[in-house]
Image (tube, helix red, strand yellow):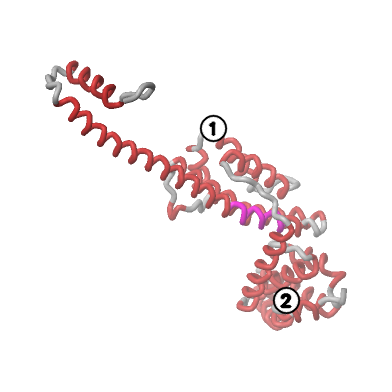
Amino acid sequence: GGAGRFDYDGETEKHLATMLQSAGEEVGEGLLPELVLALRGRAKDVYHEAASSVFSSKAQTRGKREALQVKFVALYHSFVVFRKGSALLSADAVQQVDKFLVKTVGADIVNLILADQAEVCGVPLPDGKVASSEHRDTILIALPPTAQGPLRNLTAALSGSGKSPGPDFEKALEGAAAAVGVECKQPDKNQERGLAFTIRQQWAEQLKAEDQPPIVLLLTLQLLCLHVLKLPITAPGRAAHALLEALKPSLKQEAHDSLAALIVSVQKMLSGEDAEDADEAKIEAISLMEVVRGMAVSKEGLVAACVPS
């Protein structure tokens, strides 16, 4: 080659001659250039295969990270928006509703992160999902120390046993997210509105098809809260009184009384103290159910149940 350029063929020929001599092989000078040409072609193929594999692997890893981030953000946004909704309730109710939120949406977030970490660490999972606390423990043991500590804290926060289950979980989540390469991005106003719209559609569709009085009651209360408070609240059935209390200033008396009566009937129906009383309560609950459903199954029903704003 010209001045200043590396002589690949010459250098390869020298290395090849040295290798062959040390191996006790005798090769004529005329054969060395041919061997070099053959090696150079094969080396180029191997290089391209290796490079392609590296870039493909990096692209796959990047794609998986991006897919995880999308799923994580969807769940995280739900958690944040539901917490904003629960903050509008009384102090006692906030703790109860946030604990339920941690055990439902929070558990989905933890399971998503741990399923991803299981794949990274090569821990096999049935159906590729984390479905139990045993699965979580198996994955945590296999994690590197940098991720193990933050994810143990996050898993512990699922118990919701502290006085502030929502904030405790969110703090643990921020620490864990950094350790596994996802980002806790707060939703903007448009994203909050879009999420509230989607939740309203899902609940309204579920309410139309539901035939169990306790679930009709809870869905109606949640849809009324979303209509009145402009934020969704996901709550356990035992929080029905707290939801009704938050709604009371905005409800017409007739709507309030129908909801209060259904709450009483559902509680008796589920108490299990007396079979005969439970059967009577169920008949009463079924008779009230359609009136209550009508309050939230359509925009007109929501407007009619509430005092004019």
Residue in the picture at 14% in, 17% down: 24
Residue 302 in the image: above or below residue 118: below
> Magenta stretch containing residue 80, yes or no?
yes
**Badge 1 amino acid:** Pro
Position of residue 98 in the picture relative to residue 36 (left or right): right
Position of residue 115 in the picture relative to residue 300 (left or right): left
Residue 123 disc label: none
> Magenta stretch containing residue 139, yes or no?
no
**Relative depth, front residue between 191 and 199:** 191
Q: Quadrant of the N terminus?
A: top left
Which secondary structure class fits the magenta region best?
Answer: helix
Identify the element where label 1 is drawn.
helix
- Disc 1 to disc 2, how far (Cα)? 50 Å
Residue 212 in the image: above or below residue 167: below
Asked if residue 143 shows in the view, the reply is: yes
Residue in the picture at 54% in, 32% down: 145
**Relative depth, front residue between 104 and 299:** 299
Residue in the picture at 52% in, 42% down: 137
**Relative depth, front residue between 51 and 290:** 51
Residue in the picture at 27% in, 26% down: 9
Residue 286 in the image: above or below residue 136: below
Where residue 150 sits in the image (x, y, percent)? Answer: 61, 38
Residue 152 figure quarter: top right
Marks 1 and 2 in Cβ contact (< 8 Å): no
Identify the element where label 2 is drawn.
loop
**Relative depth, front residue between 99 and 67:** 67
**Disc 1: which residue:** 145
Highlighted magenta segment, given as a residue range: 72-82
**Badge 2 amino acid:** Ala
**Disc 2: which residue:** 296
Q: Quadrant of the C terminus?
A: bottom right
Where residue 200 sits in the image (x, y, percent)? Answer: 68, 69
